[in-house]
Amino acid sequence: MKTPLRELWTGFRSLLTGMRVTLTQFFKPPVTVPYPYATLPIPERYRGHIELVRDPETGMSLCVACKSCEKACPSGCIVVEGIKREGDKKKSPTVFTVDFTRCSLCGSCVEVCPTEALRFSRRYNLAGTDREAYFLDLLKRLQAQAASTPTPATKA
Amino acid sequence: MSTSAALADAARAAARAEGRETFVLNLGPQHPATHGVLRLKLTMDGEYIARAEPVCGYIHRMHEKMGENRTWAQFLPNTSRIDYLSAMHYTHAYVAAVERAAQLEVPRRAEFVRVITSELNRISSHLVWFGAFLLDLGGFTPLLYAFDDREKILDLLERITGARLTYCYYRFGGLYNDVDAEFLRGARDFVRYLRPRLDMYRELVTENIIFRKRLEGIGVADAELCRRYGATGPVLRGAGVAYDVRRAEPYAVYPELDFKIPTHPRGDSLARYLVRMEEMEQSLRIIEQALDLIPEGPFRSKVPKVLKLPPGDTCFAVEAARGRFMVRIVSDGRDIPYRVKLRTPSFSNLSLFEEASRGMLLADALAFLGSLDLVIPDIDR
Ligand code: SF4
Ligand code: SF4
């Protein structure tokens, strides 16, 4: 006789505990964010797809087309071509593309770059309807960024 | 009709006459209770399982083979994708194996950060398991609470590593980048935050009568069975064996830290549950101590740009969230591995399922399967 009674009591207590926990939660602020009306801050070190860094003085890419990143990439998704332009000391890139569909966001390319010409973008809400949207042309992206936020050199 | 088909028909008719007819039930590869693409071919005798045959390989990605055609460093991103819930531990085993082979020094600060991040990762992994397991058992709410807690860990780790799941944070001879004071403060706050939450879980879930009745005596995997199949981690500790790689083959700075290895003798699903819940508390203790002891200093030692390992064979094991994870690397002196062998805990833990689930009710077998905490990519790798 004793066991069923005790079980009844434990069951009742379980029920009350559950209700108490739910009720306390009921008065707490929501833990979710109503995306897309509000977004969370993206941390500084967030690893989005890579992008080229601009030289703050010239507004050009810091890349010297050494192809280290191309070699370091485990997935082989970077293609860099460069030429030495007339009057320049270093090479500069003419082609810089990333196949983001294959990128594992590992950061090898960023780490290996001798001139710190690469960084992670903080673009996170990626969605697309075709594959082509992820064959990124980083030089174009750099130009677009330069157009929207001019540096002292490009402004002049 | 061929003779074999005729024979099979006759056998089936005889079985039907004797009342021991069976049928095959496919569980998975797309089934919410298998948490991934695991397929179980169940031969059922009514509601009871006569034989459960796991069919693996649906998410096989050739991680070991991939290791053989890239440099030592290029394999790093793979290590966080084998068991995606316990990425830190897997990267740890791999970098430590390479460090052992190349005899690289790791700065003390880096070792402490590795311990802190690994333990945070263990807690987040257990929280996912906790939520998903209760979901399997029919309780939806704890999942939401668990994910809320886990979110705090992910935010912390995202701040320093840049990723929320596939951290790839350790490097040969140290870390990808240093942790800052805010992370250390955040980790301490998290310890303080999670303790009362664990108490709440104990009250809400562990002491719940429905939950206990659902798990007590279900899916018994005793020490002998675990030994035969090589099961490790909470499955083995739930069978009463205090085996933990952090103590059995000490690595990093674990010998300096004080923590208990929780065990439960009964070997049933509830024992495995209790072991994991206690492990979270122990992990909090480890984090606290490591935060007190962490020294200032460099976070990465000097490593040659093109890493070539001396010819030889090196193993390194860590205690991942699911058990013993071991990496064996074989080098022939080049900058590319000759062989990367991964010993994953989920595979062994799944192996005992076939024997232990014989004669169980299907609904109980699902509770048993959940209590094994399987990660399918970890099985197939
Ligand atoms: S992040 Fe890794 S995978 Fe992506 S482009 Fe850079 S090196 Fe290649
Ligand atoms: S490693 Fe840096 S400098 Fe060299 S090609 Fe890549 S981005 Fe340019």
Image (cartoon, grey):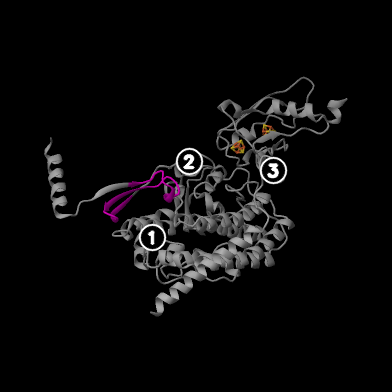
Chain bearing mark 1: B
Q: In the image, residue B166 lies at what x, y percent?
A: 57, 47
Chain bearing mark 3: A
Q: In the image, residue A33 lies at what x, y percent?
A: 66, 47
Which circle, 2 or 3, is nearer the viewer? 3
Of mark 1 and mark 2, the one earlier in the sequence is 2
- In the picture provided, is A62 more to the left or to the right than A22? right
Q: Is residue A143 above or below residue B330?
A: above
Q: In the image, residue A148 lies at what x, y percent?
A: 78, 28
Residue at disc 1, CB closer than 8 Å to ligand 1: no
Alpha carbons under labels 1 and 2: distance apart: 26 Å
Q: In the image, residue B39 lies at what x, y percent?
A: 37, 46
Q: Amino acid at mark 1?
A: Gly
- In the picture provided, is B180 more to the left or to the right than B34? right
Query: At numbered mark 2, what does the secondary structure look like: helix, strand or loop?
Result: helix
| Residue B175 in view, yes or no | no
Chain bearing mark 2: B
Crowd around label 3: few <14 · some 14–19 · many ≥20 (10 Å): few
Whether the magenta-drawn stretch holds residue B169 is answered as no
Instruction: Give the residues in magenta.
Output: B26-53
Crowd around label 1: few <14 · some 14–19 · many ≥20 (10 Å): some
- Residue that mark 2 sits on: B66
Q: Is residue B70 above or below residue B250?
A: above
Which circle, 1 or 3, is nearer the viewer? 3
Q: Residue at x 59, y 55 (%)?
A: B150
| Residue A125 in view, yes or no | yes
Alpha carbons under labels 1 and 3: distance apart: 46 Å
- Residue that mark 1 sits on: B230
The circle on residue B314 is none
Q: Amino acid at mark 3?
A: Thr
Query: At numbered mark 1, what does the secondary structure look like: helix, strand or loop?
Result: loop
- Residue that mark 3 sits on: A39
